Image: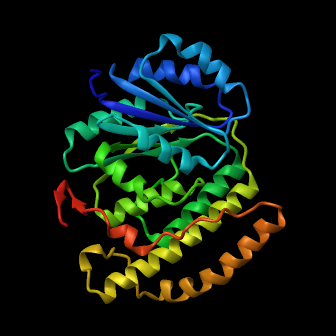
Amino acid sequence: MTPRPLLSVILPSYNNGTCLPATIRRIRQTCPKNTEVIIVMDGSTDETSRILARFLSGHPRVLVVARKTRRGKGAAVRNGVHVAHGRYIATIDADMAIDPSYVAQGLAWLQQAPALDIVIARRTAYRTSLVRHIAHAVFHWIEWTLFRMPYHDTQAPMKIFRAPVAKAVFAHMQTRSYAFDIEVLFRTMIRGHGVGELPVLQRKTQSNLRWNLLLFTAIELLRMYRTYVVHQLICLLHRQRRHLCRIGILSLRHIILWPLSWPVLWILQLLYHLQNKQIPVHSPILPTTFIKAPILVQGKRLS
């Protein structure tokens, strides 16, 4: 019987075939020996399959999940979490934007700190274009305005979870785009998990900024916010104070922004449709999904 791996590292990949061998080698060099690597091919159209077929013959503990159609980074990571076997689960970008040695550091931190359930990266240096810097700053400002999450860098491409926490959080996740980081940390905040932020350096990569993807991300972000407000109002009406976040659901900000989010969302969906992009039909994030799983605070079960 194969022993359970200590760590599972998930690599969501879309046309990253040339990067994957170097990334897997680096994971083997820096992470524990009994580390499982999970590659989720999200509708790749390059030579990823052939490259992996040649490379993986001498590399055990590598699992490839191949998806014929592209559904988004969030959906790919969710698939990886579902099949992961490790006691800890990490996700990083396949192009090694953040060196896997930071995964080893975050894992050691989790093992030494029982109060922590998740370690996320906090980029102290972000080597990218000026346009990406501006987009990142605007996105962070929107996220802070809507959710007031106390994290400095929600979009850094590295997160490490205790396996039961990752399984519970991703089981209810609905977001498919790059906004999935926001939903993951949002659900983390709702559930009361301890989160640590690890300073990292991110090297410059060749990824491009696609405006249609940014538009779809904004749509998912507004859907998430709209559902969040409904959830908090239901908890308030039912006096479920342990499920309430310290964000002031009845503050002037939400009284103004929540009604405004409806026409803004309609306009964004119209713009997306005009670009001949079909908005995926999916069930809304039901408020009850936020409170199905037990809430944990510093490892203690509250419900």
Position of 241 compared to 288: left or right? Answer: left
In the image, what residue occupies the spot 45% across and 79% down? 229
Which is more toward the observer, 158 or 60? 60
| Marker count (numbered) | 0
Residue 248 visible (yes or no): no
Q: Quadrant location of residue 30?
A: top left
Q: Quadrant of the C terminus?
A: bottom left
Q: Quadrant location of residue 295?
A: bottom left
In the image, what residue occupies the spot 59% across and 65% down? 282
Residue 57: image location, x then y, percent? 52, 12
Relative to 296, say whether 241 is above or below.
below
Residue 150: image location, x then y, percent? 39, 63
Residue 146 visible (yes or no): yes
Residue found at the far front of this picture: 1
Which is more toward the observer, 22 or 284? 284
In the image, what residue occupies the spot 31% across and 76% down? 244
Residue 26: image location, x then y, percent? 48, 21
Position of 118 compared to 172: left or right? Answer: left
Q: Quadrant of the N terminus?
A: top left
Relative to 254, say whether 93 is above or below.
above
Relative to 75, say whether 251 is above or below.
below
Residue found at the far top of this picture: 58
Residue 108: image location, x then y, percent? 28, 33
